[in-house]
Image (cartoon, rainbow, N blue to C red):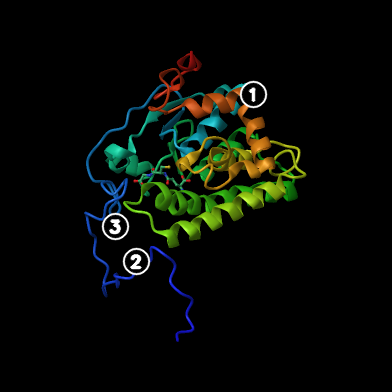
Amino acid sequence: MSDEAPAPPNYPADYTPAPVWEWNTANGGKFANINRPTSGAQREKKLPVGEHPLQLYSLGTPNGVKVTVMLEELLALGHSGAEYDAWLINIGDGDQFGSDFVAINPNSKIPALLDHSTETPTRVFESAAILFYLAEKFGEFLPSDPSARAECMSWLMWQMGSAPYLGGGFGHFYAYAPFKIEYCIDRFAMEVKRQMDVLDQNLANRRYLCGDDYTIADMAVYSWYGAVALHNIYNAAEFLDVTSYTNVVRWANELEERPAVQRGRRVNRPWGPEEDRVPERHSASDFD
Ligand SMILES: N[C@@H](CCC(=O)N[C@@H](CS)C(=O)NCC(=O)O)C(=O)O
């Protein structure tokens, strides 16, 4: 008898990796049509440029929403320099592989920011880098005390390290893969529930992630884990028993009472109820 644990049900035993991996264009799954094992521009494509110094090229997914929430929060504080044009990048159509976009983000993913207010335009990619850049530029939502700043950066980086297990791991295998594989769903559901518990325990005695102050860490973590707690992301609210994370639910609800969060969630959103959509944002009146 083997010492190995018995294979779980639905165990795909008929696959042995080839010595060298080769791209199979027909591997199926949502997004298979845009995924490639190579990087770089696939076509010449100009990006539009609006009248504001900050040009955002994005889409209203969780990674996009954290940046538009930050910009709306800065505007709500009266920072007119945070006025921005938000252009829609349709990743399903492959806009992220256009030449102008790749020049801003060689990683071909939204969000990407170009700041024209600097001597030569400053490009920023990776959502946490954009939040950090804006926090430093406007001196908001990032504590200056070194210990408080370290706590904020820790939670910000926690989000960047953790969310790929939620989206690329759990979300992919639960909602997008062409068939359900129990091993993969178990592995990533375990990790997402562990992450939710990390947040829940932290928020048990803190109003915000880092304490009494609302920071860029809240914006980043909210965009993903608020969607888990409140918006049935991947249609998995019941499966993950999200209402049991009562502190996360309380915190996410409090953030959603903020008008800037409500506005930020609508920007670059071409789906959902018509009245909530703001596919492009160029001024405050776009929300009317
Ligand atoms: N770590 C990146 C992740 C960005 C990301 O994964 N963006 C997705 C949409 S949420 C994307 O643009 N995907 C297009 C693609 O993979 O081709 C960030 O936080 O900015």
The residue located at (32%, 41%) in the rendering is 96
Q: Residues within 10 Å of mark 1 (few under 14, many from 20)?
A: few
**How far, Cα to Cα, is label 2 from label 3?**
24 Å
Which residue was labeled with disc 1? 77
Q: For mark 2, what is the residue?
A: 12
| Left or right for 167, reference 158 | left
Of residues 106 and 163, the one drawn nearer to the viewer in this rendering: 163
**Pointer 1 with pointer 3, Cβ within 8 A:** no
Q: Which of marks 2 and 1 is in front?
A: 2
Q: Which amino acid does label 2 sit on?
A: Pro
Residue depth check, mark 2 versus mark 3: number of the one nearer the observer: 2
Report the residue at 59% width, 43% height from top: 242
Q: Helix or strand or loop: what does disc 1 sit on?
A: loop
**Residue at mark 3:** 37
Residue 50: percent from left, percent from top: 39, 23
Q: In which quarter of the image is residue 254?
A: top right
Residue type indicated by callout 1: Leu
Give the residue furthest to the bottom: 1
Disc on the earlier residue, 2 or 1: 2
Residue at the spot x=43%, y=59% of the render?
Answer: 182
Circles 2 and 1 in contact, beta carbons < 8 Å: no
Say which mark, if any, is on residue 217.
Answer: none
Q: In which quarter of the image is the N terminus?
A: bottom left
For badge 3, the amino acid type reads Pro
Q: Is residue 283 above or below residue 110?
A: above
